[in-house]
Image: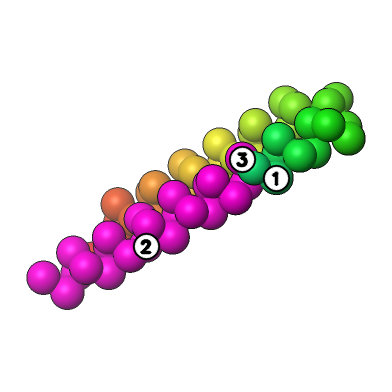
């Protein structure tokens, strides 16, 4: 039960972090649209890393 609660908390935080990163990337698109591919790569790398960490959490 505790493991599931902690995993849910980690998931919640990761989702909020992804939302913040996406929001930041949208803002940066107004200033530096040339970075779009990089913003996407960074968000994807964070998302995959967070998902893997959550999946490994025991």
Query: Is the residue marked by circle 2 packed among few (<14), some (14-19), or many (20+) residues within 10 Å?
Result: some
Query: Is the residue marked by circle 1 packed among few (<14), some (14-19), or many (20+) residues within 10 Å?
Result: few
Measured in 3D between alpha carbons, the distance from the residue under mark 1 to the one under mark 3, in whole angstroms, is 5 Å
First reached walking from the N terminus: tag 3 or tag 2:
2
Q: Position of residue 31 (x, y in %)?
A: 88, 35
Residue linked to disc 1: 24
- What residue span does the magenta drawing correspond to? 1-22
Which mark is in front, 2 or 1?
1
Whether residue 35 can be seen here: no
Q: Is residue 5 left or right of residue 9?
A: left
Q: Residue at x 76, y 39 (%)?
A: 27
> Do callouts 1 and 3 mark residues in contact (Cβ within 8 Å)?
yes
Residue linked to disc 2: 10
Measured in 3D between alpha carbons, the distance from the residue under mark 3 to the one under mark 2, in whole angstroms, is 18 Å
Q: Nearer the viewer, residue 49 or 30?
A: 30
Measured in 3D between alpha carbons, the distance from the residue under mark 2 to the one under mark 1, in whole angstroms, is 21 Å
Does 26 sit above or below residue 15?
above
Q: Quadrant of residue 22?
A: top right
Residue linked to disc 3: 22
Query: Is the residue marked by circle 3 packed among few (<14), some (14-19), or many (20+) residues within 10 Å?
Result: some
- Quarter of the image for the N terminus: give it: bottom left
Q: Secondary structure at mark 2?
A: helix
First reached walking from the N terminus: tag 2 or tag 1:
2
Q: Residue at x 71, y 39 (%)?
A: 25
Which mark is in front, 3 or 2?
3
Q: Residue at x 83, y 31 (%)?
A: 30
Whether residue 8 can be seen here: yes
């Amino acid at each position: 039960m505790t493991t599931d609660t902690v995993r849910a908390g980690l998931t919640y935080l990761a989702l909020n972090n992804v939302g913040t990163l996406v929001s930041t990337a949208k803002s940066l698109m107004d200033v530096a649209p040339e970075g779009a591919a990089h913003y996407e790569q960074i968000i994807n790398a964070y998302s995959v890393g967070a998902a893997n960490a959550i999946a490994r959490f025991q």
